[in-house]
Image (cartoon, rainbow, N blue to C red):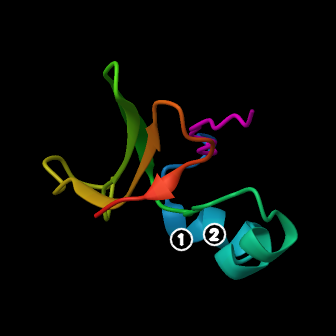
Amino acid sequence: PGAAGACDSTDRRTSRPETRFDAWRSAATILAENPWVKYTSARRGYVSCELTPDAWTAHYRIVPYVSQPDAPLETPARFVVENGRAGAERSG
């Protein structure tokens, strides 16, 4: 049996994503070095999970900026783990 998980590892020491990204390795490098990671982003956001008897859906939600109120909320990635199937699959 396999397991899947969703997490948000946002660095909250600064509210400027462009500053954080300069200090981090590129997304391509992170994905290449960690084959079990399906998605990464240096943008500010969170993971919202929806759980049903049939599936676990993780919605990765981000905003393009945090310097002003009312930034539009985006969903750049969504993953689903179906009941009885190992692993997360990208959805939509």
Q: Is residue 25 visible?
A: no
| Disc 2: which residue | 21
Say if mark 1 contacts mark 2, CB within 8 Å: yes
**Label 2 residue SS:** helix
- In-image side of 45 versus 17 (left or right): left
x, y percent for residue 13:
64, 42
Element type where label 1 sits in the image: helix
Up-down relation of residue 7 to residue 39 (above or below): above
**Magenta segment boundaries in residue numbering:** 1-11
Residue 34 is situated, as x and y percent measured from the top left of the image, at 82, 63
Q: Is residue 29 above or below residue 4?
A: below
Q: Nearer the viewer, residue 33 or 51?
A: 51
- Residue at image coords 61%, 47%: 87
The residue wearing badge 1 is 18
**In this rendering, would 19 be left or right of 60?**
right
Q: Residue 66's x, y, as percent?
A: 33, 53
What label sits on residue 53 in the rendered view? none
Residue drawn at x 45%, y 52% as measured from the top left: 44
Q: Please, is residue 26 above or below residue 75 in the view?
A: below
- Quadrant of the image for the C terminus? bottom left
